[in-house]
Image: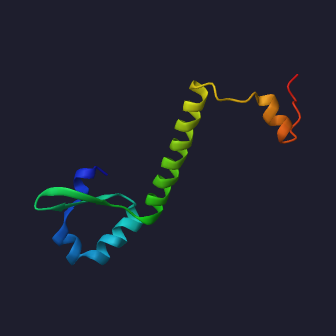
Amino acid sequence: MPLSTQIKSISYIKSHAAEVLDRLNEEREPIVITQNGEAKAVLVDVRTYEQSQETMALLKILAIADQEIESGDTVPIEEVMKEFGVKDTRG
């Protein structure tokens, strides 16, 4: 569903709060809230919010890992495997 169909005024949100929450939970599509004709916020269901937070945390971890690799701050895989008691099964 295009985001443009999910734009609602703050007054609409106030007067249809229960309906909006039901719609959010069913469709899981964000709703853009406007005030005086200007976009001010985005409303999402809790599951979508939690998923986006997890995704951002994983992306942050990947970015840190990339920085460490670029700076040469790495440990050979053999050392990591030894530390955790993993045997090398590579031929």
Identify the image quadrant of residue 23: bottom left
| Residue visible at 81% across and 32% down in the picture | 79
Tell whether 16 sits left or right of 88: left
- Name the image quarter holding the C terminus: top right
* Viewer-nearest residue: 73 or 8: 73
Across the whole image, how many numbered discs are drawn on residues? 0
- In the rendered image, the residue lying farthest to the left is 36
Tell whether 32 sits left or right of 65: left
* Viewer-nearest residue: 59 or 4: 59
* Viewer-nearest residue: 5 or 55: 55
Identify the image quadrant of residue 7: bottom left
User: Is the residue 69 above or below the residue 45 in the image?
Assistant: above
The colouring scheme, among rainbow, by chain, secondary structure or one colour, is: rainbow
Q: Position of residue 71 (x, y in %)?
A: 58, 26
- In the rendered image, the residue lying farthest to the top is 91
| Residue visible at 30% across and 74% down in the picture | 19
| Residue visible at 31% across and 77% down in the picture | 18
Identify the image quadrant of residue 30: bottom left
Q: Position of residue 14 (x, y in %)?
A: 22, 75
Q: Position of residue 46 (x, y in %)?
A: 44, 65
| Residue visible at 11% across and 58% down in the picture | 37
Tell whether 22 sits left or right of 56: left
User: Is the residue 34 above or below the residue 60 in the image?
Assistant: below
Tell whether 24 sits left or right of 73: left
